[in-house]
Image: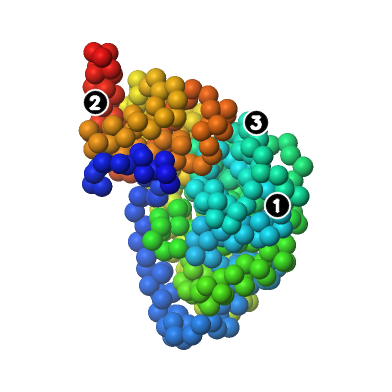
Amino acid sequence: MAVYRDLRNGVARSSAQIGYGYNLYPIAAATARHLRQVLAACQREGRLHEYGTIHDERDRALAATLAGEYLGVPVGDDQVMFTAGVSEGIGLVSRYLTACDTATVLPAPCYFAFEQTPRRHPLAIAGRYRHDGAVHWSGGGAARTAVVEILPNGVTGSSFRPPVVQADFRVLDLVFQAGGLDTARHLVADHARTALAGHLTDTAVLMTPSKDLSLPGLRAGLLISGDNALIATARDDVFDRTASATPMAGQLVLLYLTVLLMAEAAHDDDRRAFARRHAWIRAQYDRHQVTTVPTEATCRAVTGHLDRMARHFTQAFDLLTEHGKGLLHIGDDMRPIAGYSLLPRLDVDLPTPDDLVTWVNTVGRRFDLKLNPSLLFGGTRASWNTLYPGEPRMRVNLSVPHHDLVHTLDLLRTARRELDTAGAKR
């Protein structure tokens, strides 16, 4: 947060931006219609004026069934809980690990919540690792070690090789599932199933519909763990603060898990697979007495919307490759395997982190363009220098309208040219 203040000092809030941290692709109309029906059902069932009802238990049991089917691992009713977004889930897991004297090994870059929560409690961070598994150790000794895996990396959109570490616990954060390559649409799910290897022992899994379904304003998340003490502690923690979560959180998670399962069937070579999968899902909703099953038409509409979103991201990457020449180092190997985020190298001579902060702030103040460099995404100056020496990097968001992406790249080109000219004159 201190770096963020330095980056934005004197920069107009109305400035354009290249690296937004959320999905700007429009929500599917079918998703909005389904959520209106869900809200009406919650009203009929009395869920809007009670702290909790039997329907909450049914939602959790159904989520366990659907998540187990998707992840390829048995999930019990008592192994899941709904959270107010994945950020709350990260906080719950981090606080539990702190109590267990466990230090974490984080990917770099990393979502800020994995770094922010340890500073408050505090949870030791033993080290940070890059895409090839190389680790920068930073101390933070503890009796136990937990490795955090993010699939795909929420900033680079790529798959990281976990470090060779004797881990006592692991956290698997599934950031994006949709929006990937046509040739490997469900690569993230395949990686997650391989990583879990059929069990949840000493493991916590985090998922959220917010990014894939373009719903950042509706905080919903899912925490799954085979560690009974973690789930019990997390439930007590949430109860102390909020007494109960909104029923919409669970319903959003159920919609998301349904859509993920249906998306796999939609891309099956067998055209009958979609109807068969929906019949199975409808049977699970009926078995758990959950009345808000998305119709087959709704599922077709939402999965089709996700395919259009993926094409939008692909076209944006192609535009970035074309219009980013001379500004960013872009190769096809940087194309996100899912989601909308990547972190290419900036083609500017900025040898130190302080140089990068000064340059980004100058671009913001003089050219009304907000940039989000690598330093915003966790780590320390020492870890960035060790893992990515001499490589200033900047986040790009592929979910923005295509004309906005081209416009902001033009602004960046102008800023780079004028600042280079001013530097040469000095």
Which residue is disc 2 drawn over?
414
* Secondary structure state at the residue bearing disc 2: helix
Q: Is residue 348 visible?
A: yes
Would you identify the image quadrant in which residue 39 lies?
Answer: bottom left
Q: Residue at x 46, y 35 (%)?
A: 374
Would you identify the image quadrant in which residue 223 lies?
Answer: bottom right
The disc at residue 134 is 3
Q: How far is mark 3 from mark 1, CA to CA? A: 21 Å
The disc at residue 102 is 1
Would residue 18 appear left or right of 174 to someone viewing this image? left
Amino acid, disc 1: Thr
Callout count: 3
Above or below 115: residue 63: below
Name which of mark 3 and mark 1 comes first in the sequence.
Answer: 1
Above or below 320: residue 293: below
Q: Along the line of sight, which residue is nearer the eye, 75 or 293? A: 75
Q: How far is mark 2 from mark 3, CA to CA? A: 36 Å
State yes or no: discs 2 and 3 in contact (Cβ < 8 Å).
no
State yes or no: discs 1 and 2 in contact (Cβ < 8 Å).
no
The location of residue 287, given as percent across then percent down, is 63, 76
Q: Residues within 10 Å of mark 1 (few under 14, many from 20)?
A: many
The location of residue 64, given as percent across then percent down, is 64, 66
Amino acid, disc 2: Thr
Q: Residues within 10 Å of mark 3 (few under 14, many from 20)?
A: some
Amino acid, disc 3: Ala
* Secondary structure state at the residue bearing disc 1: strand
Q: Residues within 10 Å of mark 2 (few under 14, many from 20)?
A: some
Color theme of the render: rainbow
Q: Residue at x 36, y 50 (%)?
A: 25
